[in-house]
Amino acid sequence: MNLQAEGYRFRAPIAADFESWLALYQKYAVDVKTTVDRDIARIVWAWFIDPHHPAKCVLVAGEEAVVGFAHFRSFPRTLNGNEAGYIDDLYVSPDHRGSGLARAVIEHVADIGARRRWSHLRWVVFEDNERARGLYDQIAERSDLLTYIMPICARP
């Protein structure tokens, strides 16, 4: 897909993008059944505009606005002695869904990973997100791994 011809482009964020990104980030938080406050968002944003921080962001820019993003990072694979990529967050504005943008964003991150010699790209999805899973089933293999979360802050 030639996104340039379709009026979309992928780019790294700049400081002036904060409010546009924040509006989408807050909608994403609702979609994943959580909230995010402005102070936390500023911390996360600072990571993305710091070239030395491992967390990265790619924005999907339409002709007039930012319409999506992917937050990603590399991680070491200790049994293989290599690195892979992980997409932490992926969001496309509802009025741009069904356009192929989600697939294109994932492919864009995969291209970054290929240049960095990642072995593969991983991400998680809510089990009930059938629309996203429909796409993911077309472009990736479902893992047998389950995700567990152990709160650390609540430890005595």
Image (cartoon, rainbow, N blue to C red):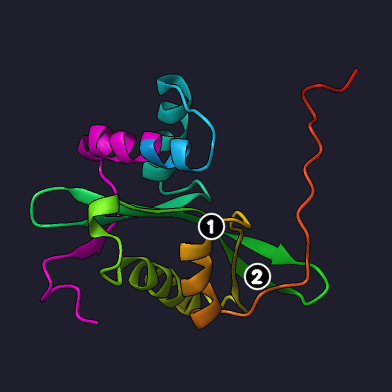
Residue 140 lies left or right of residue 93; in this view the side is right
Asked if 90 appears above or below 29 in the picture, the reply is: below
Magenta residues (range): 1-26
Which residue is painted at 8% across and 50% down in the image? 64
Which residue is painted at 50% across and 49% down in the image? 55
Asked if 60 appears above or below 17 in the picture, the reply is: below
Quarter occupied by residue 76: bottom right
Q: Nearer the viewer, residue 16 or 123?
A: 123
Q: Which percent across, then down, holds residue 69? A: 35, 53
Q: How many marks?
A: 2
Quarter occupied by residue 152: top right
Q: Which percent across, then down, holds residue 102? A: 37, 66
> Disc 1 designates what residue?
129
Residue 96 lies left or right of residue 126; in this view the side is left
Q: Which percent across, then down, holds residue 123? A: 59, 62
Type of amino acid at the residue the image marks with label 1: Asn
> Disc 2 designates what residue?
83
Type of amino acid at the residue the image marks with label 2: Glu
Alpha-carbon distance for marks 1 and 2?
28 Å
Q: Which percent across, then down, holds residue 143? A: 71, 73
Say whether residue 24 is magenta: yes
Query: Callout 1 environment at 10 Å: few (<14), some (14 to 19), or many (20+)?
Result: few
Q: Nearer the viewer, residue 119 or 106?
A: 106
Q: Secondary structure at mark 2?
A: strand
Q: Secondary structure at mark 1?
A: loop
Image mark for residue 115: none
Say whether residue 25 is magenta: yes
Query: Callout 2 environment at 10 Å: few (<14), some (14 to 19), or many (20+)?
Result: some
Which residue is painted at 23% across and 38% down in the image? 20
Which residue is painted at 46% across and 64% down in the image? 131
